[in-house]
Image (cartoon, coloured by chain):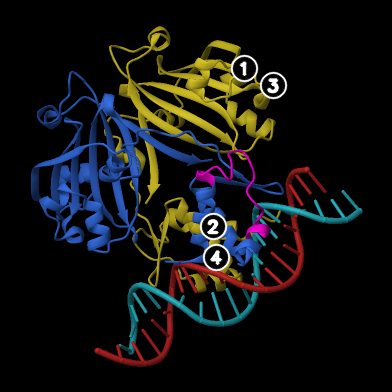
Chain colours: A yellow, B blue, C red, D cyan
Amino acid sequence: MAKSRYLEIYNFIKENINNGTYPPEEKIPSENQLKDIFSVSRNTVRKAIDLLASDGLLSSVHGKGVFVMKKIPVNFLLGGTESFKEASLKNSLKYKTSIPIFETLIVNEELNKKTHFPIGETIYHIIRIREISDEKVILDDNYFLKEIVEGLTASIAMDSVYEFLENKKGIKINGAQKIISVEPPNEEDKKYLDLRGNNLVAIVKNFAYLDNGTLFEYTESHHRSDKFVFSSYAKR
Amino acid sequence: MAKSRYLEIYNFIKENINNGTYPPEEKIPSENQLKDIFSVSRNTVRKAIDLLASDGLLSSVHGKGVFVMKKIPVNFLLGGTESFKEASLKNSLKYKTSIPIFETLIVNEELNKKTHFPIGETIYHIIRIREISDEKVILDDNYFLKEIVEGLTASIAMDSVYEFLENKKGIKINGAQKIISVEPPNEEDKKYLDLRGNNLVAIVKNFAYLDNGTLFEYTESHHRSDKFVFSSYAKR
DNA sequence: GCTAATTTGTTCGTATGTATA
DNA sequence: TTATACATACGAACAAATTAG
């Protein structure tokens, strides 16, 4: 269980950034210094630094050193509009999920166009309604390859699908391509959401892939537009 | 042109993915095979593969091999990592930029709250209107640290600010934090954009950082909601 | 302005560990 | 069990950018 050396260094640096030992816009110790501190090779130090750089926390500059990136805290940014995740995590507000639809489908041409699953595949179709502070503000329209998520039930979907897939089934997820757009609500949005006069919804289309490249999930999250916030860091 | 060996290999693999030689959901040659093909060390091959993995094009699976990720093409990409000019060129769209405001400001408390620049700093404030296919659909509200972008003019801003910063001034940009939300148009949106009855705009708040961690740009891109698309790949 | 020292970038070769087939 | 494939790690050397003197 002795984790890898580079993760030790990764966590050490991360901790020192978080507690202010390594302040923003300043340099962390040089690779050679870190190499001596941890008694490892320079390659191992570099691996930890590269990881933190891809997190957007560090930036290596040739000949100069490795700098700590200044970050704007997200909760500071949201002047008035609060993100759901934050709201539910911080205040642990009334967070409720209901599942009006849980069905098995065969992919036809129309579904293929929407989900990009191969025609003929058997899939689960689940609609989940997310309610926060007694308002139904998110509609998740989920499509899973049945063959991959075999064993998924409504009560699992009520909790967390990803926890089930990763911990219970040992499925490895590589990542997901997300496409955000703003559209008028469809019939299901009108039926299930508390739109409160909002005539548009923010839609996050999510194509999730396994480690071997297989597309196994397509989800459309429909957010009531006034409650939608999305954050990401993009390297140039 | 051969800058580095690992970039050669990176481009070789990328090309083979794009032209179908390495199909989605299948394995590329093993690290040892690639090592022999290019007569390099395995480390160099791994560096190329790691880069492509962080692009979301490959996925390494311990003991199995390296798989090509299946990707859904996004035909219309705006608001992503790329600049307006890059995105327009890629999608070969007709675009035009006008600049109704180009002014110098000192950061006061109100501006500090919005842009997060330190109070007292001198900044450029630029408003740019983006016209695509003869419709004014994007309003860019830009704030730049004057000290960093010294020499920036309206005619440069008309073309591409980033091209000027990176190529002419040699400024290295690490990346940017983006916050997306949907809000009612403000007075400037109503004044400058062809809203065509749209009563909401999609807003991309962009905090851009230099390689040494300094925040040097804050931009709010206001997109007419029906013309807004944002794409990103998130690794898990 | 020049040289030397420092710091990151690239590359090599080798060895051992761990997951998969 | 054995062979293959990726993961981690070490040590070394030289290149390139920057800084210190």
| Residue under label 1 | A155
Residue located beneath label 2 in the image: B48
| Magenta residues (range) | B17-34
Of the two numbered discs 1 and 4 on the same chain, state the one appearing first in sequence: 4
Q: Is residue A202 above or below residue B60?
A: above
Q: Is residue B23 magenta?
A: yes
Q: Nearer the viewer, residue A212 or B92?
A: B92
Residue bearing mark 4: A45
On the same chain, marks 2 and 4? The answer is no
Cα separation between marks 2 and 4: 19 Å
> Mark 3 and mark 2: span between their CA atoms?
38 Å
How busy is the neighbourhood of tag 2: few (under 14 within 10 Å), some, or many (20 plus)? many
Q: Chain of mark 3?
A: A
Identify the residue at horizontal 56%, vertical 54% (top origin): B49
- Amino acid under label 4? Val
CA gap between label 3 and label 1 equals: 11 Å
For the point 61% across and 69% down, the residue is A40
- Nearer-the-camera pick, A77 or B59: B59
Closest to the observer, B75 or A96: B75
What element does badge 2 sit on?
helix
Chain letter behind tag 2: B
Expressed as whole percent of the image width and height from the top left, the position of residue B151 reads 14, 60
Q: Amino acid at mark 1?
A: Ser
Q: Amino acid at mark 2?
A: Ala
Give the Cα distance between marks 2 and 1. Answer: 43 Å
SS label for mark 4: helix
Q: Which quadrant, please, contains the C terminus of chain B?
A: top right
